[in-house]
Amino acid sequence: MLMLADHTPISLAKVDVLILCGGLGSRLRPIFHDRPKGLALVGGKPFMDILVEDLLRQGFRRVIFCVGYLKEQIVDRYSARADAEYRFSQEDVPLGTGGAVQNALPLIRSNPFVVMNGDSRCHVDFKELYAFHHLKAAAASFVVTQADQRHDGGVVCLDETQKIRFFLEKSRGNVQHGCFISAGIYVLQQEDVGRQHMALPCSLEHDVFPTLVNTKSCYGFVVGSQLIDIGTPERYWKANEDFHR
């Protein structure tokens, strides 16, 4: 059984997960326009169902959806489920990913808590991630993976202790040797995110994380899993192809 340094068994049942799923999904409108991006079908199943089922398998029992565009579909779908506690942080105007987290803080009970994108997937053992976050006494832990051929994600460079040297969102250049790409999964501390009051809308990636990395001890948790996202038509179709392999 995986334990923390003080020999406390790790239980994820009381750890909150925020799923960011309020975006407009504008780039996918040519494929579908009748649903939020997170409910796009991948392998015949709504993409967020795939994410939620993995969270439940790993022991989470409290999920908070940060909803905006076509939010009623997400609220109706998950409020009808009884396999976990589902809550909804609703925004009437786009707040950005940073604003969505700020808006959800009153609903968050756990500290730390997990944040993940509702339109991407990268398999991670969350108990190992949670133990890593505590061992490092991190203000934030980023799940990172190899960039492969992608050069448009958040670039995360680590030192020999896995502390983040710098974070650069949506880099278009080649990823430097020793750097990784952000998987869009984070473990955050309420006190470090909550004190960053910024004008809305604001972005985790552009506004919150650069300041956090420069002022606090943030670490990268390296996984070997592939990053899959459905944010563009090309990646959406590829996700469907990979699902059937």
Image: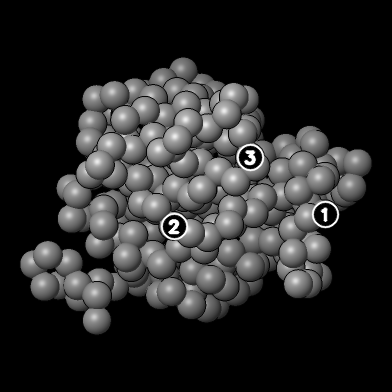
- The local crowd at label 2, few if under 14, some if 14 to 19, many if 20 or more residues have their Cα within 10 Å, is some
Q: Amino acid at mark 3?
A: Arg
Label 2 to label 3: alpha-carbon separation: 16 Å
Outermost left residue? 6
Q: Nearer the viewer, residue 4 or 168?
A: 168
Q: Is residue 37 left or right of residue 159?
A: right
Identify the residue shown where x is 59% and y is 53%.
227
Identify the residue shown where x is 74% and y is 58%.
239
Identify the residue shown where x is 80% and y is 36%.
27
Identify the residue shown where x is 77% and y is 42%.
232
The location of residue 151, given as percent across then percent down, is 61, 34
Quadrant including the C terminus = bottom right
Relative to 187, say whether 47 is above or below.
below
- The local crowd at label 3, few if under 14, some if 14 to 19, many if 20 or more residues have their Cα within 10 Å, is some
Q: Amino acid at mark 1?
A: Trp
Q: Which residue is mark 2?
A: 223
Q: Nearer the viewer, residue 154 or 4?
A: 154
The circle on residue 237 is 1
Can residue 129 be seen by looking at this rendering? yes
* Label located before the other in sequence (2 or 1): 2
Q: Nearer the viewer, residue 216 or 91?
A: 216
